[in-house]
Image: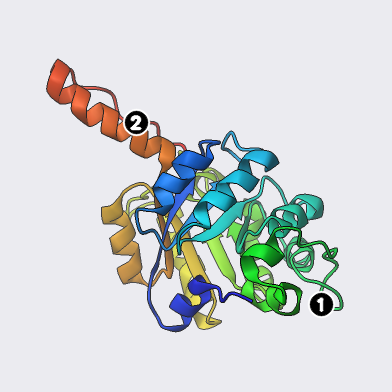
Amino acid sequence: MKKNKLKELFKAGKPIINSWLAVPSSFSAEVMANQGWDSLTIDMQHGLIDYPNAAGMLQAISTTDTVPMARVNWNEPGQIMKILDAGCYGIICPMVSNRAEAEKFIQACQYPPNGYRSFGPIRASIYGGSDYWKHADTEILKLAMIETKEALEKLEEIIDTPNLDGVYIGPADLSLAVGEEPGFDKPDNTKAYNEILRILEAAKKRNLLAGLHNGTAEYAQKMIEKGFNLVTVGSDSRYIASGSKKDLEKLKKIKKENISKSY
């Protein structure tokens, strides 16, 4: 089976630079994949992407060395298994709030006897290799999103779940969970920022990968220096908007409002 480059980067102590795909297009995915990102995450939660879109986007990403991941829209075994069968090499699972939900997520990513993933790697065996099923349990990156009030209260039990590879922090929902406005790049004096560092420290103690969604490259660099192993910067839709905004400001001499802070 093709090795998961993200796990190799993590073991080597090198940061993983990830970006986001929200546009349901194999061509835009191919363009992004050719820019040199370590990984690209197909957003099936808040993006406009359905399964047929995602399958074509995975094929486009596969023309490069960029590792394909997906954020599923819920901790639903059928969707997790299906996107893995399409050749996804990493799953970010949202709203994991306790140990039982973390176990449910992990087991959907693993074949028996370690889990209950159904056998049928229709495209994964093409992308990963004919022996995919023998090594998928350990090569697939499994990241649980810590972003709810319950998850913050039960952080220890979640990150102690066997075979969990790491955590991924969504600052917007995390901010809501602590009573603050949603957004990325949280200032140092906020409750959300303190919780982000607490999650990071808990993950590091267990040698788990810690990932964070960021609004800017500057903030992402700051968080790498804090110890995060995976940072997400931008998205296809945000890069389209920011590029357009920049040129229009020059040509029309009109200052546009800030780009949306959503994914």
Residue depicted at 54% across the width and 76% down the height: 208
Q: Position of residue 53 (x, y in %)?
A: 62, 39
Looking at the rendered structure, the number of numbered marks drawn on it comes to 2
Q: Which residue is mark 1?
A: 114
- For disc 1, the neighbor class at 10 Å (few under 14, some 14 to 19, many from 20) is some
Q: Is residue 259 above or below residue 31?
A: above
User: Which is nearer the eye, 218 or 198?
Assistant: 218
Check whether the beta carbons of the residues at disc 2 and disc 1 lie within 8 A of each other.
Answer: no
Which x, y percent locates residue 191?
44, 53
Q: State the mark number for residue 200.
A: none
Q: Nearer the viewer, residue 171 or 212?
A: 212
Q: Is residue 27 above or below residue 103?
A: above
On the question of residue 191 being in view, the answer is: no
Residue type at mark 1: give it.
Asn
Asked whether residue 38 appears in the rendered view, the answer is: yes
Which image quadrant for residue 165?
Answer: bottom right
Q: For the point 21% across and 31% down, which residue is it?
A: 246
Quadrant where the N terminus lies? bottom right
CA–CA distance in space, label 2 to label 1: 44 Å
Q: Secondary structure at mark 2?
A: helix
* Residue 263 location (% of width, % of height): 47, 40
Image coordinates for residue 207, horizontal then vertical, percent: 52, 82
Q: Residues within 10 Å of mark 2 (few under 14, many from 20)?
A: some
Q: Looking at the picture, does residue 239 appear above or below residue 91?
A: above
- Residue drawn at x 34%, y 67% is 224
Query: Along the polypeptide, which appears first: circle 2 or circle 1?
Result: 1
Please indicate whether residue 247 sits to the left or right of residue 237 in the image: left
Please state which amino acid type lies under the numbered disc 2: Ala
Judging from the image, the colouring scheme is: rainbow
Is 30 situated left or right of 132 in this image? Answer: left
Where is mark 2, residue-wise?
241
